[in-house]
């Protein structure tokens, strides 16, 4: 009898809501004008083609883990919860500090979230935050997660993209920045949540090699190479020109075509799932890649500019951090009031994309 009652209340919980947000960006801010010291570019070129005016970049004293920790602490403070109440930690990133452990585990250690709960990273590039919310939604609606004493999930989006930028190459390096933002999420029977994620395998439009992998013959066994990532060998392999670098490379036009296609489709998808037409939604929070991508779709759909929250002028493209960074800025500006309804839409390397409908 008792068990049946439990089951019923679990079935009732089928939405999720964000109850706290926090952000952290590196102190060092470089304007477009500052970049002219390093490459042949101009504020006019960057601003007119992307909408970006500045970006924040980590110095040697800051790391992704530091930013993710600070953003998480602020999100927990905003939600008014203690580390002991966190039951799940996910970090969306494609610029992890260590191959292992995950950023999520490092944040768990830094914040003192007691052991015994899952903590892991996901890599869906710029769609990572939306992918993460879908995971949280699914896990929270699973019986085991719902019965946990620790009801809150910590969802982080964090990147240190400067690690893989080639500042001698102007067409990609001007676009990106570093930063992290975090959300505290809980299950809700009142707030509705809808989500959709997708990918189409593509390694050529946007990629960065893992430095050292499959490049250095370390030993041979039955004619097959076993590779190692000994730093000395990496240096030698670079010098010998047999190793690829780990810089981010992009086919800008291909990404542009992909982005406008999936952004438009995902707005329709979210409207269909939530039954809230795009004209009636309060805000559409797109991955902050490039204002031209967003403008193109906005005009195509005949939607007003005010509906699209933008902060890429300040931070550039921060990949997995970009959507939560936008949400955190919106909260700081008092834009997330009770009842506010939002579509969040991400798109990025993979090629991945996804959308979610959130109610505040
Ligand atoms: N400053 C000055 N000139 C530059 C710069 C720069 N930073 N970068 C490139 N140029 C020059 C090029 O050398 C080229 O000169 P040329 O005509 O003499 O050869 C000229 O500008 C045009 O270069 P293109 O690469 O053709 O520029 P394009 O008009 O395609 O714009 C851009 C590039 C902005 C990246 C565009 O392709 C775009 O918007 N792509 C969408 C992809 C995007 O925004 N990605 C973000 C990351 S992906 C993601 O988050 C999903």
Image (cartoon, helix red, strand yellow):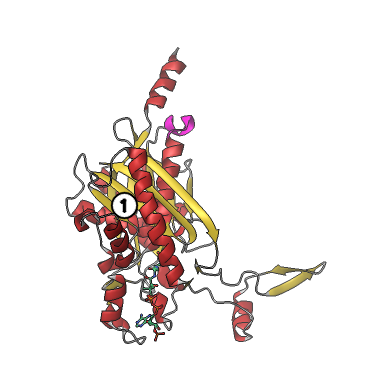
13 within the magenta span: no
Residue drawn 51% across the image and 69% down it: 208
Residue 160 is situated, as x and y percent measured from the top left of the image, at 40, 66
Residue drawn 41% across the image and 39% down it: 137
> In the orientation shown, which residue stands out farthest toward the top?
1
User: In front: 149, or 283?
Assistant: 283
144 within the magenta span: yes
- Which quarter of the image is occupied by the C terminus? top left
Residue 121 is situated, as x and y percent measured from the top left of the image, at 48, 53
Badge 1, how many Cα within 10 Å: few under 14, some, many 20+? many
Residue 279 visible? The answer is: yes
- Which quarter of the image is occupied by the N terminus? top left
Ligand 1 is within 8 Å of the C-beta of the residue at disc 1: no
Residue 88 visible? The answer is: no
Q: Name the quadrant containing residue 233.
A: bottom right
What range is drawn magenta here?
A: 141-147
212 to 72, vertically: above or below: below
Residue 238 is situated, as x and y percent measured from the top left of the image, at 59, 82
User: In front: 79, or 108?
Assistant: 79
> In the orientation shown, which residue stands out farthest toward the right?
222
331 to 175, vertically: above or below: above
Q: Which residue is mark 1?
A: 73
For this view, does 47 lie left or right of residue 226?
left
Residue 249 is situated, as x and y percent measured from the top left of the image, at 48, 73
Residue drawn 31% across the image and 43% down it: 358
Residue drawn 49% across the image and 59% down it: 351
Q: Secondary structure at mark 1?
A: helix
User: In front: 299, or 167?
Assistant: 299
Taking the image as four quarters, which one is ligand 1 found in? Answer: bottom left
172 to 347, vertically: above or below: below
């Amino acid at each position: 009898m008792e068990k049946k009652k439990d089951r019923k209340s679990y079935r009732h919980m089928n939405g999720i809501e964000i109850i706290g947000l926090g952000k952290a960006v590196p102190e060092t801010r470089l304007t477009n004008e500052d970049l002219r010291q390093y490459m042949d570019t101009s504020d006019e070129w960057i601003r007119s083609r992307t909408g970006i005016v500045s970006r924040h970049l980590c110095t040697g004293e800051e790391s992704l883990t530091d930013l993710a920790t600070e953003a998480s602490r602020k999100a927990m403070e905003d939600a008014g919860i203690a580390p002991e109440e966190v039951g799940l930690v996910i970090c969306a990133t494609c610029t992890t500090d260590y191959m292992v452990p995950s950023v999520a585990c490092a944040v768990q250690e830094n914040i003192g979230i007691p052991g015994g709960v899952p903590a892991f990273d996901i890599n869906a590039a710029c769609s990572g935050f939306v992918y993460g919310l879908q995971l949280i939604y699914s896990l929270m609606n699973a019986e085991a997660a719902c019965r946990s004493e620790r009801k809150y999930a910590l969802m982080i989006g964090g990147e240190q993209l400067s690690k893989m930028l080639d500042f001698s190459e102007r067409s990609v390096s001007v676009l990106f920045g570093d930063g992290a933002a975090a959300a505290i999420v809980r299950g809700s029977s009142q707030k509705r949540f809808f989500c959709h994620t997708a990918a189409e395998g593509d390694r050529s439009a946007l990629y960065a090699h893992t430095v050292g992998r499959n490049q250095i013959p370390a030993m041979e066994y039955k004619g097959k190479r076993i590779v190692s990532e000994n730093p000395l060998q990496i240096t030698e392999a670079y010098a010998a020109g047999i190793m690829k670098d780990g810089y981010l490379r992009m086919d800008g036009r291909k990404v542009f075509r992909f982005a406008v296609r999936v952004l438009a489709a995902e707005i329709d998808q979210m409207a269909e799932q939530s039954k809230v037409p795009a004209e009636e939604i309060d805000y559409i929070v797109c991955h902050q890649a490039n204002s031209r991508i967003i403008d193109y779709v906005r005009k195509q759909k005949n939607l007003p500019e005010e509906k699209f929250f933008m902060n890429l002028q300040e931070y550039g493209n921060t990949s997995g951090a970009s959507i939560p960074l936008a949400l955190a800025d919106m909260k700081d500006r008092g834009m997330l009031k009770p009842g506010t309804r939002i579509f969040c839409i991400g798109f990025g390397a993979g090629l991945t994309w996804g959308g979610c409908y959130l109610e505040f």
